[in-house]
Amino acid sequence: MRTLTLAAAAALAAGTVLVSHPASASAPTTTAVQAAKHHDAAPIVFGHRGASGYRPEHTLAAYDLAIQQGADYIEPDVVSTKDGVLVARHENEISGTTDVADHPEFASRKTTKTIDGTSLTGWFTEDFTLAELKTLRAKERIPGDRPANTAYNGLYQVPTLDEVLDLVDAKEAETGRTIGVAPETKHPTYFDSIGLSLEEPLAKSLKRHGLGGKSSAAVIQSFEVSNLKDLNRMVGTKLVQLIDFGGAPYDQVVAGTGVTNDFLVTDKGLRSIKKYADQVAPYKFYFIPRNADGTLGEATDLADRAERAGLPTVIWTMRAENKYLPTECRKGTDPIAIGDLGCEVGPYLDAGVDAFFTDHPDLGVAARDTWVATNQ
């Protein structure tokens, strides 16, 4: 298999956010000219939860479409069933992504749990066997933003991780392309606490599919630290430290270490990540903040500092609807109309990031290719 060099993953909080840069980060200095040295190869495009801008997320149809649209990697978030099978869902609470509420036979499974310190009421994958989950059907998670996707509600099952990997194997054989996979472990501390560890079955699945080595077209992502350290001892697959915007990794909260996400993007934090991970994926506003009027601000030097630490950088998430884009990249006044994704992608590539996640892989690939044609 061809080796791809990068990966990462997760979700985007909509709206304007202002960045307070960590104290150890130097003032914004990165320019498009300076950034050119980062890109020895074309930046990599990740299909975020598949082509989730066009199909309900984390379905085989969404992954298949992302591959058709040219994504270099697809991203299955993984959670566990009651019987220890890894399935692709963004969260273990599934009322927003499946029709479980329409199944009277499962009404008694509705419950309230505390997940990573947050109280949630609904239905949870760990309370269902795989056979039971297979009776459900996926639906669009954000129908207000993506009403067209609701046409596909009820058509697709919840796939297992192995089914996703089987799809990738089949598409590689069909197309002759190498297609990367970037599974993300969701709530690993929580799943450990209920005896359904994610790490061991994930490592086994990747090894079964020939994705257990550093040279394979696969990476494993997590917002937590300790489970990446555990995986570093279990499997050779490259590891990616995801970094949320503010707050702290939940495992570090539980352990009381005082490690925050802002610390992880300092020089000392990046050096600590390099000891167990291969890449780093901070939230995109750490690289370019938004101004008060919603426009893009000046680029920080985070990509440069990560490169000095030996960590390629990945950002998340590029979404093409106007409401998610910087003000200058929007088209018209409809908040859910498609704007100019390339207008946002270009400055991040100029700032030196090596890869990005997008819900719209076709637009992301086009933006990447346009940037490459202009800059390389």
Image (cartoon, grey):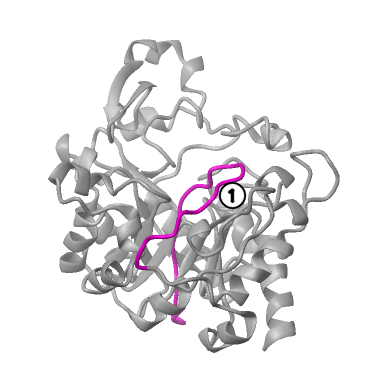
Q: Return the x and y of residue 243 as percentages of the image width and height.
A: 38, 56
Residue under the image location 30 percent in, 36 percent down: 81
Question: Residue 74: where, in percent of width, then height?
Answer: 51, 60
- In terms of secondary structure, what is the magenta stretch mainly? loop
Residue 349 in which image quadrant:
bottom right
Identified at 52% across, 24% down, the residue is: 99
Q: For the point 52% across and 59% down, which residue is it?
A: 284
**Split into 4 quadrants, where in the image is the N terminus?**
bottom left
Magenta segment range? Answer: 1-24
* Residue type at numbered disc 1: Ala
Q: Can residue 69 be seen?
A: no
Magenta stretch containing residue 8, yes or no? yes
Q: Which residue is mark 1?
A: 62
Whether residue 40 is visible, yes or no, is yes
Please state if 56 lies on the left or on the right of 307 as rendered: right
- Estimate the x, y position of residue 255 in percent, counting from the top left: 13, 46
Q: Position of residue 242 (x, y in %)?
A: 37, 58
